Every structure is written in C-alpha cells, then in structure tokens.
Image: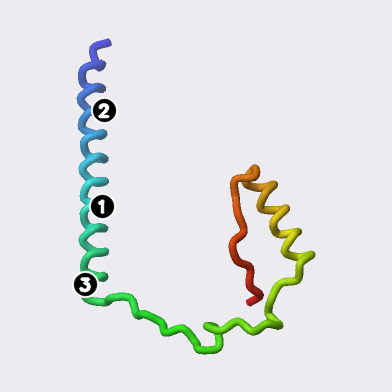
Amino acid sequence: MENLPEAFKLLVVGMLTVFCILLIVIYFGKLLIALVNKYAPEEVAKPAKAALKATPSAAVDQQTMSIIQAAVNQLTGGKGKVSKVEKV
C-alpha cells in the first residue's frame, strides 16, 4: 500500500502525456490539411459532353424500376424514394 500514491502519480503523468501527444497530432493534422488545401487545391474535372445527355435507349425498363423501388422500400422501411435511375 505504500506504492499507491506513486502509482497514481504515474497514472496521471501517463494520461497527461497521451492527451498532449494526441492534441499535437490533431493540430498538426489540421495544419497539414489547411496547407494542402491552400497550396494544392483540388482540380475540378470537366464532365464529358457524352455523359451529360442520356440517350433514350439508356432508360431503365419498367420491371427493373419496380424491382429497384421494392428493394429501396424494403431497405428503408418505406421511407426511401427513388427519384431517378440511369444506366451507366
């Protein structure tokens, strides 16, 4: 029992050390993200003209649409809604 206060001191020092290291990792991560976003912004890809217009032959048939709607209803408990389906 004479080592109990020393054990608690080691516990507190260890926990504070881990906490400080995690704070350092978090702030350096945020700094790295900010620097990357500032000096290397994401390139915006231009969509292909062929992908913009859907051809009538690319429409999904009625049977497939009803199967997709039934699957969405079952997975979402009737709360989901299918608004658009396209073949890729």
Measured as percent of width and height from the top left, residue 24 is found at 21, 50
Q: Earlier in the sequence, mark 2 or mark 3?
A: 2
Please state which of the two labelled residues, at mark 2 or mark 3, is closer to the viewer. 3
The residue identified by callout 1 is 25
User: Going by the image, does 61 lie left or right of 8?
Assistant: right
Secondary structure at numbered mark 1 = helix
Q: Earlier in the sequence, mark 1 or mark 2?
A: 2
User: Going by the image, does 35 lie left or right of 80?
Assistant: left
Secondary structure at numbered mark 3 = helix
Which circle marks residue 8 in the picture?
Answer: none
Residue at x-position 79% and y-position 64%: 63
The residue identified by callout 2 is 11
Please state which of the two labelled residues, at mark 1 or mark 3, is closer to the viewer. 3
Amino acid carrying mark 1 in the image: Val
Residue at x-position 63% and y-position 68%: 85
Q: Quadrant of the N terminus?
A: top left
The residue identified by callout 3 is 38
